[in-house]
C-alpha cells in the first residue's frame, strides 16, 4: 500500500514538473518583443512619416540650429563611410554639380530629423540654409563623401537651401516643415 502511494505521489510530482516546464516555456516565448522597422522613404510624401525615425536616442538631436557651423553648440555631424551606417528614416539628399536630388523634402515641425548628405562626383559642396536661424545646419561635403546631420526641425514654413560654393549657388532646394495636424 505504501509502495502504491509513493508511486502515485511520484507520478503527480513528475506531471506537475512537466506542466510547469511547458507553462514556463510558453510564457518565455510570449515575452519576445516584436520590433517593427520603418521603411526608408522613397518619395517626398513618405518623408513626413519617416523623418523622426532616424535615431532611437534624442541625445543625437541636441544642437542649436542657430549656432555657428561646426561649433560645439551646432547640431552633430558625422562622416558616413558605408551606406549601411545611414540611420533608418534618414532623409537622403544628393548634391552634385547639377543640383540636389530630391529638390525638396518634408518634415514635421519640432521633430528630430536626420539628413544624409552625399556629394556625388569629385567636387566639394557646401549645404547651407541662407537663413540666420538655420546657420548651424551648414555642412561641408567633399566629393564622394556622405555626412549626416541631426537636428530638431524649426517651426512650420518653407526653408530654402543651396550649395554655397560660388560656382554652384544656383543649385537650390527647399525643406518644407509642416505642423502635425490630427483630425
Image: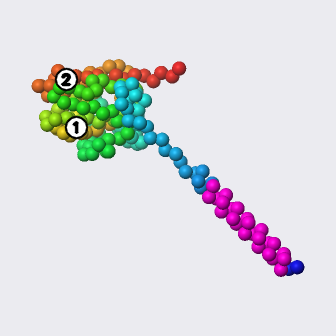
Task: Name the main secondary structure of what is drawn in magenta.
Answer: helix
Q: Nearer the viewer, residue 176 or 67?
A: 176
Which quadrant holds residue 42?
Answer: top left
Measured as percent of width and height from the top left, residue 163 is found at: 19, 27
Q: What number is the disc on residue 171? A: 2
Q: What residue appears at the point 79 percent right and 72 percent down from the top-left corner?
A: 9
Q: Is residue 120 visible?
A: yes
Q: Quadrant of residue 157?
A: top left
Residue that protrudes farthest toward the right in the picture: 1
* Residue at the disc numbered 1: 70
Left or right of residue 37: residue 29:
right
User: Which residues are drawn in magenta?
Assistant: 3-26
Q: Is residue 108 left or right of residue 75?
A: right
User: Which residue: 53% across, 48% down?
Assistant: 33
Q: Is residue 71 visible?
A: no
The image's mark for residue 161 is: none
Amino acid at each position: 500500500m505504501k509502495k502504491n502511494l509513493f508511486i502515485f505521489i511520484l507520478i503527480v510530482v513528475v506531471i506537475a514538473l512537466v506542466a510547469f516546464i511547458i507553462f514556463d516555456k510558453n510564457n518565455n516565448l510570449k515575452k519576445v518583443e516584436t520590433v517593427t522597422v520603418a521603411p526608408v522613404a522613397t518619395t517626398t510624401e513618405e518623408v513626413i512619416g519617416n523623418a523622426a525615425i532616424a535615431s532611437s536616442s534624442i541625445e543625437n538631436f541636441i544642437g542649436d540650429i542657430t549656432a555657428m557651423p561646426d561649433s560645439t553648440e551646432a547640431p552633430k555631424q558625422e562622416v558616413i563611410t558605408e551606406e549601411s551606417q545611414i540611420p533608418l528614416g534618414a532623409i537622403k539628399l544628393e548634391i552634385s554639380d547639377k543640383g540636389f536630388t530630391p529638390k525638396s523634402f518634408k518634415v514635421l515641425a519640432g521633430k528630430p530629423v536626420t539628413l544624409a548628405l552625399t556629394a556625388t562626383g569629385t567636387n566639394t559642396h557646401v549645404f547651407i540654409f541662407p537663413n540666420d536661424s538655420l546657420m548651424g545646419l551648414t555642412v561641408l561635403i567633399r566629393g564622394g563623401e556622405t555626412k549626416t546631420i541631426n537636428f530638431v526641425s524649426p517651426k512650420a514654413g518653407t526653408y530654402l537651401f543651396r550649395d554655397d560654393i560660388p560656382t554652384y549657388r544656383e543649385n537650390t532646394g527647399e525643406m518644407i516643415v509642416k505642423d502635425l495636424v490630427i483630425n
